Image: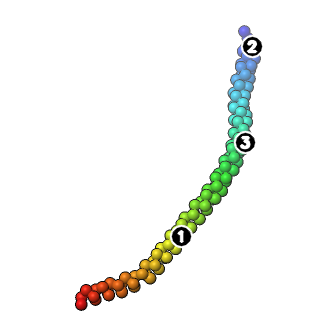
Amino acid sequence: MTLEFWRDLSVVWISIFFFLLCLVPLAVAFLAVHGMRKVLGGAQSGLENLQNASSQARAKTEETAAKVTSAVIQGQSKGERAQATLKQLLQRTAPDRDSAKSRNGSASTQ
């Protein structure tokens, strides 16, 4: 075996190693880019779906909060009106009680 044979053989081996060493990283990079495009496309549509769902949930929450708030406000206003009415009734009857006590008290002291 001559030196030319080994030279040709080493050139073939170097070419194969170089091809494999360049091909593998290029294939990995290609697959990574391709995969990232798919992931981003899926994530974008998924995020749009989530955004729609969250906006619907927000709208429903605001609607329900408005209903609950109006019911609470109406209940409080009815309670305030009842309290004011009761206070007025007690103020009207309070002088009658005081005058009755003073009449009863003066009669008992005589």
Q: Which residue is drawn at 74% across and 19% down?
A: 12
Q: What residue type is labelled 2?
A: Phe
Q: Residue at x 40, y 82 (%)?
A: 94
Q: Which residue is drawn at 66% across and 47% down?
A: 50
Checking the image for residue 41, the label placed there is 3
- Measure how far apart labels 1 and 2 are at the Cα level: 107 Å
Dots 1, 3 in contact, CB < 8 A: no
Q: Residues within 10 Å of mark 2 (few under 14, many from 20)?
A: few
Residue 22: percent from the left, percent from the top?
Answer: 71, 29
The residue at which mark 1 appears reads as 78
Please, which residue is most extreme toward the bottom here?
Answer: 110
Checking the image for residue 18, the label placed there is none
* 87 w.r.t. 19: above or below: below
Please tell me which of labels 1 and 3 falls first in the chain: 3
Q: Which amino acid does label 1 sit on?
A: Lys
Q: Mark 1 or 3, which is nearer the eye?
A: 1
Please tell me which of labels 3 and 2 falls first in the chain: 2
Corner quadrant of residue 40: top right
Residue 33: percent from the left, percent from the top?
Answer: 72, 37
Q: Mark 1 or 2, which is nearer the eye?
A: 1
The residue at which mark 2 appears reads as 5
- Measure how far apart labels 3 and 2 are at the Cα level: 53 Å
Q: Is residue 82 left or right of residue 110?
A: right
* 35 w.r.t. 55: above or below: above
